[in-house]
Image (cartoon, rainbow, N blue to C red):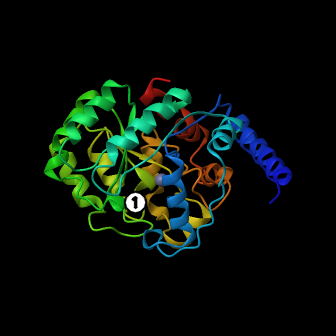
Amino acid sequence: MNDHRTASAGRTEAAEVHRFRERLGLPGLVDVHTHFMPERVLHKVWNYFDTNGPLTGGLEWPIAYRREEAERTALLREFGVLAFTAMLYPHKPGMAAWLNAWAADFARRTPDCLHTATLYPEPGVESYVREAVEAGARVFKAHVQVGAYDPADELLGPAWGLLADAGIPVVIHCGSGPAPGKHTGPEPIARVLARHPRLRLIVAHLGMPEYEDFLGLAERFEEVRLDTTMAFTDFTEEFMPFPRAALPRVAALGDRVLLGSDFPNIPYPYVHQLHALERLDLGEDWLRAVCHDNAARLFGL
Ligand SMILES: [Zn+2]
């Protein structure tokens, strides 16, 4: 696609997002699940999706927003996203502190990005998590599938305790979608929550495909939340459909479901995530809470 066509496609889509916001009377969106990371790392992620790496579940996954960083932030602003995150995560030891340094700098030069940090079970994790919190981190990302670690690993205990005490939310990819990992699924998370019941976990992707188990954890632990990332979209419904019978539970947890998109690593336009939520027919109050109010309250925006 040439530059001119890319720009006009962006404008058309922005207009659709604006119409969505106007229907709801929302000042803007808050998206708790967007990926920003050092370019070299992001390109590796894109390459992984391009070659259908095993964690993609072998699915065709054409990245819709393969753009320069400045264009990606500009696009989110055009969509009216008031606040977003820089979800980044290590796949091995010795990487998290370096990612956190990058994310702190990104947050400094990107005022609408909620300062994000990450962690990994390794010696020193408690001290770099504390440093990140002292430096102003407002949200953490943990990736149980890519990191291939047990979230209940003893090495992480003090870090979870610190984050629970500080009330800092952790977006955690812990469901077994799009492909299972050694430690994905609800059981390890239940063990973490048994020890840290006040920990503010935000279960990514609505826990797909173990949607109901993770809804159950949110029902048991009042600080557990879920993000909508990729859930209910045509793409996901095709291979990990949400069980319709559980929809009333998603409605009932309306104050703890948060908009997430996975921008830019999505194989469809951004607005499709919004339309996928709208067509659930859970009502305008639910949509307003999910797309803006819940996150605004959680992060004090
Ligand atoms: Zn993601």
Tag 1's secondary structure?
helix
Res 163 seen here: no
Local packing at callout 1 (Cα closer than 10 Å; few below 14, some 14-19, many 20+) is: many
Q: Is residue 161 above or below residue 194?
A: above
Q: Is residue 95 above or below residue 21?
A: below
Instruction: Locate the N terminus and report the quarter of the image it occupies.
Output: bottom right
Residue 105 vs residue 162, the one in the foreground = 105
Residue 283, picture quadrant: top right
User: Residue 68: percent from the left, percent from the top?
Assistant: 65, 47
Residue appearing at x 43%, y 47% in the figure: 88
Residue type for callout 1: Tyr
User: Residue 94: percent from the left, percent from the top?
Assistant: 28, 49
The reply, left or right, for residue 285 in relation to residue 75 is left
Q: Is residue 273 above or below residue 51?
A: above
User: Residue 295: percent from the left, percent from the top?
Assistant: 48, 33
**Residue beneath disc 1:** 211
Residue 48 vs residue 189, the one in the foreground = 48
The reply, left or right, for residue 119 in relation to residue 162 is right
